[in-house]
Image: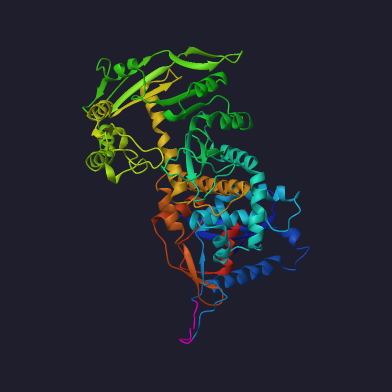
Amino acid sequence: MFLRKNTNKKTGRTYLSIVQGYRDKKDGSSRTATVQSLGYLDELEKEYEDPVAHFSRVVADMNKKKYADNLPATFTFSMDELIDQGFVNRKILGYAALSRIYHELEIDKFYQNRQRHLHIEYSLNAIMKLLIFSRILDPCSKKKTFEAKDRYFEKFDFSLDDVYRSLSCINKHKEALQLWIHNHIRKQYNRNTELVYYDVTNYYFEIDEPDALRKKGVSKEHRPNPIVQMGLLMDAAGMPLAYKLFSGNTTDCTTLIPILSQIKNDYALGRIIVVADKGLNTSDNICCNLLNGNGYVYSQSIRGANKELKKYVLDEKGYAWKGTDYKKKSRLYPGEITIMNAPGEKVKTTVDEKQVIFYSCDYDKRAKAEREPALKKAMELVNNPGKFNRVNSYGAAKYVKDLVFVKSTGEIITTGHRPEFDLDKLQEEEKYDGYYAIVTSEFKETDEHIIEIYRGLWKIEESFRITKGDLSVRPVYLSRAEHIEAHFLICFLALVIIRILEYRTGNKYSPGKMIESLKQVSCTYLQENYYMFDYFDDIVQDIGNAVDIDFSKRIMRLNEIKKKLGDTKK
C-alpha cells in the first residue's frame, strides 16, 4: 500500500488516498485499488500539521501489520497434551457457500421481519440456518443437528426446546416464504415461468396408526406404511418454484389444481404451460388449464389408450426416421374430455390437441430390461406358487393367468387353480416398448420442441431423488402435523439452495458431488486461533469461484474465517 497524491491541473488542488497495488490475474498488468479516500490536502491541513507525513506513517503501520499477518507462524506441541472434551476441534467451513445463497435470497431478513411481531427470545433466523445447512451437509434428526451445532463458526444461542418450538412458527409462514424466494429468484436469475413442470411423490412413515396427514395410499415404493404426498412445481431451469403437502390418501391427479390455483395469482405468473407425466393427464386438469388460459404438455399412456390411438402408434405411415434408431410423427386430433357443466352434470366435450408420437430404440431396450426381473419372478411364481402371496408377488402377478388369492391371508390358491404364464399379456405389452405419446394444447409448436419440453421432466424426477437420497427427507422424527410441514419446508429450502449452486456452477456437477465436496471443507484447531484445512478439489474451487469465496488457503486465523463468513451475509 502507498499514499497517492493526485493534483488537479485546473484547480491545483491535491487529493490524498491510500491505494493498494496488485497484479491483474487476467492479463498480468499492474493495477491499483483504493483502500481509503482521505480528502483534499488543503482541507486536511486544517486538522493535521503535516497531512502527508501523518498519513505516510499510517500507511507504513498498515503495511507492517499486513506483513506481520503473513509471517510464518510457529507452533509448539507437547507430546503429553490431551484432547479437551469440552472444545470442538473440528469445524466446517463448506457451509459458507450455502450461506452466500441463503443471504442473497434474504431469508434472514424474512424471519427477522416476522420475529418483530412474535414474543420469542430465540432467533428464528439462526435456527433456520442451522437446520438448512445441516440438512444439506449432514442430514439427521433435529436433536442430533442441535447437538452438532458447535461444528459451525456461528453463534447458535438457543436450546433444543427452542428448535422444536420454532417449527410451529416456521410452518405458519411457509407459503409467504415460498413467494418471497420466488420473487428473489425472479429478480436475481431472471426466472422463466412460461414452462412449469409438476410431479408428485410420497414419503412413508414408520408408524403404527395413520393420522390426519399421514394416511395409507398408493406408495411409490410399494410399502404398506402411512404416507404423505408432495406436489412439486419446477421452472424451466430446474429450480424449485413451490410445493404443497397432501394427505397420503390423496390421488396424484387431484393435487395439481389446488397448488396451481394458489400460486397462479400469488406469483403473478401469467400464461404458463404445465408439463407433467401421464398420471396428471386427466379431464379435470386439462379443463382447469384451458379455462385459466394456460397450456399443457402431458404424456399419454399408450397401453391404456383407446384402440384408435394404439392403431395410429403402430402404423408406420407418417413416421419420419432419424437414423435407424429413432422416429416420430404427429397429428392434430380432437381430444375428448369429460367436464362438469353448470347444473352439475358430467358431459363430454372436445379440445384442440396435438398428439406427438416418438419411438426410441434405446427406450425399447430399457423397457425390456426393466421388465425382466418381473418376468423372472412371474416364471418362479408359476413353478413355485407356494413361495408367494399377494404382497410379494407384486409386479409379477400381471403376467400370470388363473391367479387367485385367499382374501384373509393373501396366500395363493392352488387347489383347482393352476397359475399359468400369460404369454399374450407379455406380447401385447412388448408391441409398445420404446413408444411414447405426448398430448399438448400447443399445436403450433414443432414436434421437436414439444419433445424437448417434455424431456425436461427428468429434472423434477431428479429433484425427488435428491430429497430422498442426498437430503434424506425421511425418516422424519416428528409427529405433529405442523412440525412435519415445517420439516418439509426446510427440505424444500435446502433443495432450492443446492439447485441454485448447481446453476451458478454451470450445471457442471451433480448436487450429490457438490454436497460431498462441501462437507469435506473443514478444519482442525491448532493453536492461538489458527485452523488448518485439509481438503480442496476442482469442485470446491469452482463453487468458490461461483460464490466469490476462496477455499484454497491451508492455514487461517479465526478472524479471517469469520470475515469470510461475514462477507457472505452482506
Coloured how? rainbow
Please say whether residue 7 is visible from this viewpoint. Answer: no
Q: Main secondary structure of the magenta part?
A: loop
Q: Find residue 408 and report its image quarter.
A: top left
**How many numbered badges does the structure rendering display?**
0
Q: Find residue 161 and report its image quarter.
A: bottom right
Residue lying at 49% horizontally and 12% vertically, measured from the top left: 349
Residue lying at 59% horizontally and 45% vertically, measured from the top left: 485
Please say whether residue 128 is visible from this viewpoint. Answer: yes
Residue furthest to the front: 415
Relative placement, left or right, of 355 versus 55 is left
Percent position (x, y) of residue 269?
A: 58, 29
Q: Find residue 309 and report its image quarter.
A: top left
In the image, 548 versus 52, the foreground residue is: 548
Q: Please tell me whether residue 527 is drawn above or below residue 416 in the rendered image.
A: below
Percent position (x, y) of residue 450?
A: 40, 25
Q: Please tell me whether residue 312 is drawn above or below residue 515 in the rendered image.
A: above
Residue 220 among magenta residues = no
Q: Please state the extent of the stretch shown in magenta in the rendering.
A: 73-80
Percent position (x, y) of residue 217?
A: 48, 38
Residue 75 among magenta residues = yes
Residue furthest to the right: 46
In the image, 529 versus 220, the foreground residue is: 220
Q: Quadrant of the N terminus?
A: bottom right
Relative placement, left or right, of 525 versus 570 is left
Percent position (x, y) of residue 532?
A: 48, 70
